[in-house]
Image (spheres, helix red, strand yellow):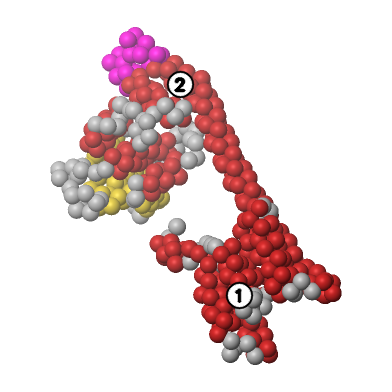
């Protein structure tokens, strides 16, 4: 709840924080006062001190106390009938009693008290006018009580329906969370049974090849494949932990490539790319900036995806990886020359989209596409809030 709304509700606490109820009370108060004064003028009751005292007592209690203490207001209105007050204030008060207390002994007692006062003090036990009294009681007592009971039951029904709607919403949210959790576990099982199995097979075969390689170059290549496969398994294990909700909140997936600082993670990526025969040049600022962990992981993923895309779409092309930093900005740039013969390696189609989402989550901005000079350039800019070291 906003502060101004809280203040408004505090000022209107007697009207449940609703301006409409205050306006309605003012309208009812004005109407009752007008009818009372009109009756006083017609019957020349303004010169009676007792009537004026009863009218003042009614005015002082009706507006502020009617909703909170309707029984007290009803007693004041009934007490003023012998002094000359009409049945109008008592009619409004008995209606409010029925609205607030519903069908119960309080409303029944107030109804009986009103009938006794009206018949005993207003009609003076004139049995010859009993039909007129019955009509008056029906219009000014029973009808308001029935209307108040209907409003009370309506409010109770609305409260029950509102509670059921909130309960249904909570149940729907719980079911949705359970469905999401079940789907995440299903995805984790599929990734474990299919992807992890395949990557493990690659790592084992590459390890066997590195042992039985016919020459040194083949052995180094096989060892690189094995190392990359092991790193992929580590990252996959972290992703499976996240999908199964086993990782603590805010804990990044464990990885051999991250967690060693910005220099260590990017250096390892470039070293793995060089081991596969790629031509990569790395340029880092000296000293390296101190960046938040989320920015560090985003930089790592940007460089990783950019190197992968360059190897798929421009094999054997030279790749420049550069990281520059100022006091308030970190810029990561990866560019390579476009190749007319991309490698025939299938991709997921979500590489650039995933990079952009990760960079934006870290508060940065990503641009990617062909640039002048026949190169493809990926640039990520991250604002730095912390001081560089």
The residue that appears at 56% across and 37% down in the rendered structure is 174
Is the stretch drawn in magenta largely helix, strand or loop?
helix
Instruction: Specify whether residue 325 is painted magenta.
Output: no
Q: Is mark 2 on a helix, strand or loop?
A: helix
Residue 272, located in which quarter of the rendered image?
top left
Q: Can residue 232 be seen in this view?
A: no
The residue that appears at 54% across and 26% down in the rendered structure is 186
Residue underneath mark 2: 196
Where does the image place residue 264, in percent across and percent down from the top left? 23, 33
Residue 179, located in which quarter of the rendered image?
top right
Instruction: Specify whether residue 212 is painted magenta.
Output: yes
Query: What span is colored magenta in the figure?
Result: 204-224
The residue lying toward the viewer, choosing from 180 and 15, is 15
Residue underneath mark 1: 80
Q: Residues within 10 Å of mark 1 (few under 14, many from 20)?
A: many
- In the image, residue 371 above or below residue 298: below
Q: Tell me if 290 is positioned left or right of 222 in this view.
A: left
């Amino acid at each position: 709840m906003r502060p101004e709304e809280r203040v408004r509700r505090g000022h209107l606490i007697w009207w449940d924080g609703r301006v409409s109820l205050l306006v309605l009370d003012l309208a009812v108060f004005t109407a009752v006062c007008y009818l009372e004064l009109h009756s006083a003028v017609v019957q020349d009751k303004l010169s009676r001190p007792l009537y004026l005292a009863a009218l003042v007592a009614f005015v002082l209690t009706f507006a502020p106390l009617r909703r909170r203490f309707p029984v007290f207001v009803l007693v004041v209105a009934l007490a003023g009938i012998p002094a000359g007050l009409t049945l109008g204030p008592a009619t409004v008060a008995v209606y409010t009693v029925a609205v607030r207390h519903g069908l119960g002994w309080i409303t029944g007692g107030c109804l009986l008290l009103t009938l006794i006062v009206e018949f005993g003090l207003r009609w003076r036990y004139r049995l010859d006018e009993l039909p007129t009294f019955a009509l008056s009681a029906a219009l000014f007592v029973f009808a308001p009580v029935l209307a108040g009971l209907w409003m009370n039951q309506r409010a109770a029904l609305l409260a029950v329906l509102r509670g059921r709607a909130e309960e249904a919403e909570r149940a729907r949210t719980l079911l949705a969370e359970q469905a999401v959790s079940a789907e995440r576990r299903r995805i984790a099982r599929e990734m474990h049974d299919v992807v992890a199995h395949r990557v493990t097979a690659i790592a084992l075969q590459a390890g066997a090849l590195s042992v039985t390689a016919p020459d040194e170059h083949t052995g180094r290549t096989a060892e690189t494949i094995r190392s990359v496969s092991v790193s992929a398994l580590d990252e996959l294990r972290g992703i499976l932990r996240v999908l199964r909700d086993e990782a603590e909140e805010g804990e990044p997936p464990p990885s051999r490539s991250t967690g060693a600082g910005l220099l260590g993670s990017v250096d390892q990526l470039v070293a793995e790319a060089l081991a596969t025969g790629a031509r990569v040049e790395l340029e880092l600022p000296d000293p390296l900036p101190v960046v938040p962990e989320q920015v560090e992981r985003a930089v790592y993923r940007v460089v990783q995806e950019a190197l992968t895309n360059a190897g798929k779409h421009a094999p054997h092309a030279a790749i420049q990886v550069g990281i520059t930093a100022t006091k308030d900005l970190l810029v990561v740039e990866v560019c390579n020359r476009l190749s007319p013969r991309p490698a025939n390696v299938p991709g997921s189609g979500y590489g650039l989209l995933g990079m952009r989402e990760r960079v934006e989550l870290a508060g940065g901005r990503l641009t990617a596409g062909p640039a002048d000079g026949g190169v493809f350039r990926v640039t990520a800019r991250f604002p730095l809030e912390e001081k560089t070291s």
